[in-house]
């Protein structure tokens, strides 16, 4: 299946574009997606945390992904 992922903050800077399309096996979990992205973009693995949101909600590691899901990578946020 093909997944479309929106990237924000430092994740967008690391990948070099605001969205990413990746091919994944049916039923890929949110954690599995992160692992494959860490392999493709090792700088993502260096972030202190990187949340996966699916359909506007933070996803648990075992959340299965579907081709039509709205997926976003949300890096740690700092500010004051």
Image (cartoon, helix red, strand yellow):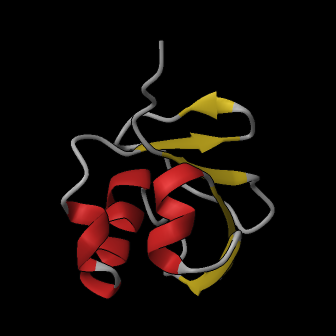
Among the 4 quarters of the image, the one containing residue 51: top left
In the image: residue 62, left or right of residue 71: left
Residue under the image location 37 percent in, 74 percent down:
37
Residue under the image location 28 percent in, 40 percent down:
49
In the image: residue 46, left or right of residue 53: left
Q: Nearer the viewer, residue 16 or 51?
A: 16
In the image: residue 27, left or right of residue 61: right
In the image: residue 42, left or right of residue 74: left
Return the x and y of residue 57 as percentages of the image width and height: 64, 28
Residue under the image location 46 percent in, 66 percent down:
28
Is 1 above or below relative to 68?
A: below
Q: Is residue 26 visible?
A: yes
Count the marks.
0
Return the x and y of residue 43 as percentages of the image width and height: 26, 71
* View extreme (right): residue: 68
Is 16 above or below relative to 4?
A: below
Return the x and y of residue 70 as percentages of the image width and height: 76, 52
Is 12 above or below relative to 41?
A: above
Among the 4 quarters of the image, the one containing residue 76: top left
Q: Nearer the viewer, residue 66 or 14?
A: 14
Is 29 above or below relative to 39?
A: above
Residue under the image location 61 percent in, 52 percent down:
8
Q: Nearer the viewer, residue 54 or 29?
A: 54
Quarter of the figure with the N terminus: bottom right
């Amino acid at each position: 299946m093909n997944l479309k992922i929106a990237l924000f903050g430092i994740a967008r800077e690391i990948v070099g574009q605001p969205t990413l399309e990746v091919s994944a096996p049916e039923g890929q979990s949110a954690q599995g997606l992160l692992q494959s992205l860490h392999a493709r973009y090792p700088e993502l693995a260096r972030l202190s945390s990187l949340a996966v949101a699916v359909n506007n909600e933070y996803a648990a590691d075992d959340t299965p992904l579907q081709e039509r899901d709205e997926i976003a990578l949300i890096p740690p946020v700092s500010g004051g």
